[in-house]
Image (cartoon, rainbow, N blue to C red):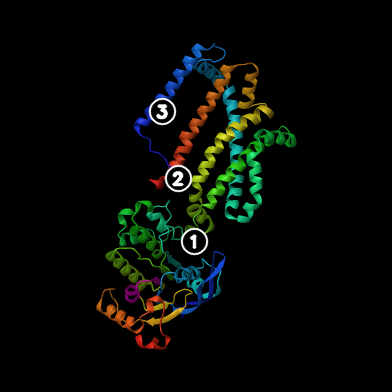
Amino acid sequence: MIALEVAVERKAYRREGREVAAISALRFAVPAGQFACILGPSGCGKTTLLSIIAGLDRAYEGSVRGPAAAGRLGMVFQTPRLMPWLSVRENVRLALEPPPRQEGRAEELLRDMQLGALLDAYPTQLSGGQQRRVALARAFVRDPDLLLLDEPFLSLDAPTAQHLRELLLALWARRRPTILFVTHDLREALSLGDRVLFLSAGPARVVLDLPLELPRPRAPESAAVEALRKRLMESYPDLLRGLAAPSSAESAA
Amino acid sequence: MSVPVQRFGDVWLRWLSALSFLVLWSAVAGLAKAPLLPGPGAVAAALAKLVVSGQLPFDLGVTLLRVAASFALAMVVGSAAGILMGKSRGVDAFFDLWLVLGLNIPALVIIYLCYIWGGLTEVAAIVAVALNKVPNTATILREGARAVDRELLQVAEVLHLPPLRRLRRVYLPQLYPYLMAATRSGLSLIWKIVLVAEFIGRSNGVGFRLNLYFQFFDITNILAYSASFIAVVLAVESWLMRPLERRLAGWRR
């Protein structure tokens, strides 16, 4: 069963009167329940891709099948995007359909994320990392069927980021949503995903589709992840700049 | 828009300010000839008499009803027009000239035209007053609609919020400061214009009565009516506007 089928043939921006291609011939499919990471150089169009899949951007050529049929959508943007006039609790409850059937669900999740003492605080009173956690809670609380995350752990300290990765994996293990996780951190991608899609520099397309069969749990610093990363960098020295020799695509996996 | 926290000392300063105004008034009234500037005591006595006779409460009530009707009409029409103009560049380009026209046409001209076309009726009076305020509301709300954060609207879209919830939780809170500004400036503007409309074409209300006293050079009663008026404004400000503002801006602590 395919949860998500993406075929963005072309997406362009107008910048200073000229057309700049952001995405070109980017095609991939994600089976239901898969945890797919998307990795690419910065500015390659990853955020644009998520906007298209979420239905926020409709000005592109191609098709995206799945999100509408998939059910509830959860999305974590690159910045927290909390409503400053709503308290932490209200921000999370905004994502629940009224009246909230599971009373206390938002609070329970926020306590899990070590935000229990801040339920009635307003976003301006929180640190950047706390705001990020609230944004994650807002996406998790819906029990999404499709979860789109845009570098959600950026600029968090390492222990917090690791704790949140574990929470994400726990949510995924419990509910099996389809996940698209955008990052530029190779270790993070290798430690989380069932699969990593490497994108080229803009206009973005898939240069390498790497299935991962390492057993979980795998920490980003673990020897297995590190060994895989080394092997990958040896086979494709320019992979993180968005280049991979297509002829050797099989040997690394 | 900030809501300063009232300190204990501030309250005393306010009382001191009011008291010194009364002292100054008495002193000047003592120096001037009594009929030209009656002192606070004489005005208070006149005010008490007018209240007891029921004449002032009736006039004040009639005027306040006109203020309320004109204000409601102007806020609804002006906000709708302003939001539409702020959201759509086409609408803005089309109506911009109308707005400049409306902002600059003298209040007196609008009142005369409304009375000529609509007769000396209640409806004509209320419409005339409202028309004076609509361009002002529209201008303020246009700024507000332009400043609406698109990123937060995207959050609402991803969460599939129903229209009413989106309006209440995401869209309107961004406009509250502008609505408050339009309300503030609107009340004082409408207040003043209602009196003009009353003295030109109505046979009751504060404006009508002031004109009557003016013809008899009855300064004491003119001041008594003004005082009642100011009392109402102060009451609206401290018991309606400030608490409302505190509630809406609570998150800005």
Q: Position of residue A21 (x, y in %)?
A: 52, 72
Dot 1 crowding, Cα within 10 Å, few <14, some 14–19, many 20+: some
The stretch in magenta equals: A181-192
Say left or right for A236 vs B85.
left
Q: Chain of mark 3?
A: B
Q: Position of residue B17 (x, y in %)?
A: 42, 25
Which label's residue is closer to the chain start, 2 or 1? Answer: 1
Check disc 2 and report the residue beneath it.
B248
Q: From the viewer's perspective, is residue B233 above or below residue A51?
A: above
Could you tell me the amino acid type at mark 1? Answer: Gln
Same-chain check, marks 2 and 3: yes
Q: Chain of mark 2?
A: B
Q: From the viewer's perspective, is residue A79 above or below residue A3?
A: above
Check disc 1 and report the residue beneath it.
B154
Q: Nearer the viewer, mark 2 or mark 3?
A: 3
Q: Is residue B119 visible?
A: yes
Dot 3 crowding, Cα within 10 Å, few <14, some 14–19, many 20+: few
Mark 1, secondary structure of its residue: helix
Q: From the viewer's perspective, is residue B228 above or below residue B150?
A: above
